Image (spheres, rainbow, N blue to C red):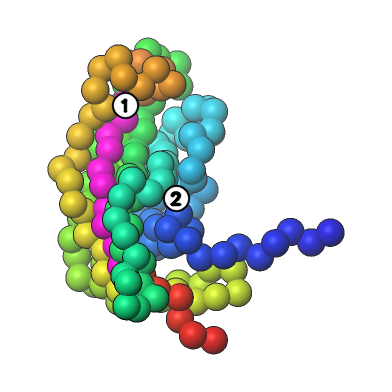
């Protein structure tokens, strides 16, 4: 049985955009944070998911807000690696504010093409509140930002 074709959605579109940013390794971007041994050398970008926004009523345009987190860790230390998390987050924010990387991009997702009309950060970079997120070990540096984007599936 063949796997279903990948369909464009908010996660796959933001993932395609993140993979287009220079300096972020393709294999260090996902929706799930893997074992730290797989990313401690570079840091990691997690697509947390859609946290807001709404599709347009009168056109087939999506306008979600997506949370993106970056992580940094030292493999053999309990000290968080804020430098790696911050460097990755800076690349994302700068690309989100640069018209050459945040406006009018076309990506192929599965068998479809999508047009990223525009994308921009809508929050300041922040750390999670202490004690709220117990899923992350204290040795991980974690930064968060919210990105709003407008995108549409191109007609075939």
Q: From which residue to which does the magenta span run?
A: 141-150
Pick the front one: 138 or 64: 64
| Residue at the image point whose x is 45% and y is 16% from the top | 76
Q: Are marks 2 and 1 in contact (CB under 8 Å)?
A: no
Q: Which residue is mark 1?
A: 141
The crowd level at tag 2 (other Cα within 10 Å; few <14, some 14-19, many 20+) is: some
Near-viewer residue (80 or 50): 50
Residue 25 is marked as: 2
Residue 55: % across, % down: 34, 65
Q: Is residue 95 visible?
A: no
Q: Residues within 10 Å of mark 1 (few under 14, many from 20)?
A: many
Percent coordinates x, y for residue 60 in the rendering? 39, 76
* Viewer-side residue, 53 vs 17: 53
The residue positioned farthest toward the right in the image shown: 1
Residue 22 is covered by the magenta coloring = no
Q: Residue at x 18, y 61 (%)?
A: 97
* Magenta stretch: includes residue 149: yes
Mark 2 vs 1, N-terminal side? 2
Principal SS element in the magenta part? Answer: strand
Residue in the image at 31% along x and 19% along y: 132
From the image, state whether disc 2 or disc 1 is nearer to you: 1
Q: Where does residue 79 sit, x and y in percent of width and height?
A: 32, 16
């Amino acid at each position: 049985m063949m796997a279903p074709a990948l369909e464009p959605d908010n996660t796959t579109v933001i993932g395609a955009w993140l993979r287009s940013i220079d300096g972020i390794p393709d294999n260090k971007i996902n929706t799930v944070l893997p074992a730290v041994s797989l990313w401690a050398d570079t840091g990691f970008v997690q697509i947390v998911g859609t946290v807001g926004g709404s599709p347009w009523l009168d056109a087939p345009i999506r306008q979600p807000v997506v949370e993106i987190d970056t992580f940094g860790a030292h493999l053999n230390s309990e000290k968080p690696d804020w430098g790696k998390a911050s460097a990755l987050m800076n690349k994302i924010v700068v690309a989100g504010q640069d018209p050459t990387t945040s406006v009018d991009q076309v990506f192929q997702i599965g068998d479809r093409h999508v047009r990223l009309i525009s994308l921009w950060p809508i929050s300041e970079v922040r750390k999670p509140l202490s004690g709220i997120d117990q899923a992350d070990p204290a040795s991980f540096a974690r930064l968060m930002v919210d990105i709003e984007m407008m995108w549409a599936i191109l007609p075939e």
